[in-house]
């Protein structure tokens, strides 16, 4: 009732209602109803997209729903911008956030599998704020082989170049047989081919070499220009910095981006000599 009165007063006096809708959204747990009743009514669309990225719902279904809503918004906004010679929307803040949302969506799916069809908000938030490599190493340090195997299966292309760093993080008490599927020379090894032959998500238009080149070459002043063009306020920029959406995070945001890097820069699968050295 108080929110309704605040909206009525704002409209009567010709005031911006965005602040009321924003306050309402941030005061409640992330939900599909809140997204429909409050988030959808906010005119500051960069703020909305970032809220979709950082939202941490209590269920997998709600988490995916919110992320997909953000993806639809970035699709609409990015395609309003002039197209490049590659027949894709020009590199923009919206494309950058789309890749971040795709990375978050993949991490939500990973958590869903780790939780055997359930969901853990805390695990998701930790995974979303980490690079995949850091998440894998942390799982190894804690001896959580169940989670590590799923992370590796779903993000093989990202992790393969650093597989021995990950294995080195495992406690010495872990027997080799318990992580045999992670060893590149094992007959039971889970390769990226096994996963990509049955992956759940289709490649997205934003997952391309053209955009990866922009991520790789980005400088601090480039981000400032992207923010200006998308009319992104400082508060939104501050949130992204706190959430660790860094250049490194974006470079490995999704498996497809990692595969593109391997195709363009050569495979980074450990050599036979690397394997022999690690075994010794």
Image (cartoon, rainbow, N blue to C red):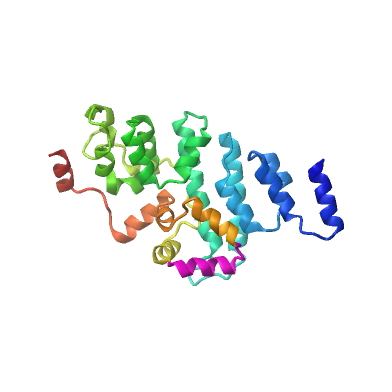
**Residue 74, located in which quarter of the rendered image?**
bottom right
* Furthest residue toward right: 12
Q: In the rendered structure, which segment of residues is drawn in magenta?
A: 219-233
Look at the magenta stretch and give its main secondary structure: helix
Q: Position of residue 72 (x, y in %)?
A: 61, 52
The C terminus appears in which quarter of the rendering?
top left
Please, is residue 59 above or below residue 226 in the view? above
In this rendered view, identify the residue nearer to me: 76 or 141: 141
Q: Which is nearer the eye, 105 or 228?
A: 228
Residue 278 shows in the view: yes
Residue 32 percent across, percent down from the top left: 66, 40
Q: Position of residue 276 (x, y in %)?
A: 14, 42
Q: Is residue 88 left or right of residue 271?
A: right
The reply to whether residue 39 is in sight is no
Q: Nearer the viewer, residue 110 or 140?
A: 140
Q: Kindly identify the residue that appears in the image at 33 percent across and 40 percent down.
A: 137
Tell whether 108 sits left or right of 50: left
Residue at 84% from the left image edge and 56% from the top image edge? 11
């Amino acid at each position: 009732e108080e929110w309704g009165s605040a909206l009525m007063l704002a409209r009567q006096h010709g005031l911006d209602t965005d602040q009321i809708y924003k306050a309402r959204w941030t005061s409640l747990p992330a939900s599909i109803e809140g997204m429909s009743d409050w988030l959808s009514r906010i005119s500051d669309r960069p703020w909305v997209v970032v809220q979709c990225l950082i939202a941490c719902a209590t269920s997998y279904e709600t988490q995916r729903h919110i992320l997909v809503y953000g993806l639809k918004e970035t699709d609409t906004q990015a395609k309003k911008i002039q197209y490049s010679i590659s027949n894709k929307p020009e590199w923009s803040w919206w494309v950058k956030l789309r890749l971040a949302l795709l990375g978050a969506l993949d991490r939500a799916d990973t958590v869903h599998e780790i939780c055997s069809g359930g969901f853990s908000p805390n695990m998701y938030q930790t995974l979303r704020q980490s690079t995949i490599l850091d998440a894998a190493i942390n799982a190894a340090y804690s001896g959580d082989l169940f989670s590590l195997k799923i992370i590796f299966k779903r993000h093989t292309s990202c992790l393969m170049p650093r597989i021995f760093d990950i294995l080195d993080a495992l406690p010495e008490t872990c027997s080799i047989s318990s992580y045999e599927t992670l060893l590149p020379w094992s007959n039971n090894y889970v390769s990226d081919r096994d996963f990509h032959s049955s992956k759940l998500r289709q490649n997205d238009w934003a997952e391309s070499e053209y955009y990866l080149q922009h991520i790789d070459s980005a400088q601090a002043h480039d981000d400032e220009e992207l923010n200006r063009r998308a009319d992104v306020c400082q508060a939104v920029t501050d949130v992204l910095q706190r959430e660790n959406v860094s250049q490194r995070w974006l470079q490995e945001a999704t498996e497809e981006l990692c595969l593109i890097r391997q195709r363009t820069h050569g495979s980074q699968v450990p050599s036979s000599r690397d394997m022999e050295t690690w075994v010794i």
